[in-house]
Amino acid sequence: MADFKDYRMKEAKCPRCGRVMDGATNCTGDGAPSAGDFTVCFYCATILRFGFALQLEMPARADFEELMRQPPETLLTLGKIQHLVRARARERAGRN
Ligand SMILES: [Zn+2]
């Protein structure tokens, strides 16, 4: 896999699971997270979107419609990340 670039960011809470994240990894380029970017929660694998102040938001129906109009690689990448996050969660659960 390519080298992904990690970014520190202001703490943001996942609206789904409530966990707080203070970093993000860009899996499709090398820019820092910006408003409107799609992302995946590191803990619950929910697809989220960065808001204007880089807070995490649940995507609205219109956001998903926009996602469907993007190149298929975008959705494919989000799906791969969800898979990795879930595999990591299963691995951690198995260790307890
Ligand atoms: Zn979450």
Image (cartoon, rainbow, N blue to C red):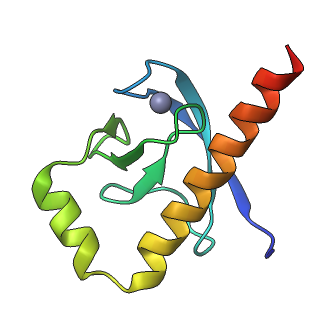
Q: Residue furthest left?
A: 62
Q: Residue furthest right?
A: 95
Q: Nearer the viewer, residue 95 or 51?
A: 95
Residue 89, image quadrant: top right
Q: Residue furthest top?
A: 96
Q: Quadrant of the C terminus?
A: top right
User: In the rendered view, would you say 87 is above or below 66?
Assistant: above
Residue 66 placement (x, y as % from top left): 19, 70
Q: Residue furthest bottom?
A: 71
Residue 69 placement (x, y as % from top left): 23, 81
Drawn side of residue 92 relative to residue 32, left or right = right
Drawn side of residue 34 relative to residue 58, left or right = right
User: In the rendered view, would you say 77 is above or below 52?
Assistant: below
Residue 1 placement (x, y as % from top left): 81, 74
**What residue is shown at x 60% (from left), y 38% (from top)?**
42
User: In the rendered view, would you say 86 is above or below 93?
Assistant: below
Total marks in image: 0
Q: Nearer the viewer, residue 7 or 94?
A: 94
**What residue is shown at x 50% (from left), y 62% (from top)?**
78
Residue 40 placement (x, y as % from top left): 49, 48
Drawn side of residue 24 relative to residue 60, left or right = right
Q: Nearer the viewer, residue 15 or 44?
A: 44
**What residue is shown at x 22% (from left), y 61% (from top)?**
64
**What residue is shown at x 76% (from left), y 22% (from top)?**
93
Q: Nearer the viewer, residue 12 or 75?
A: 75
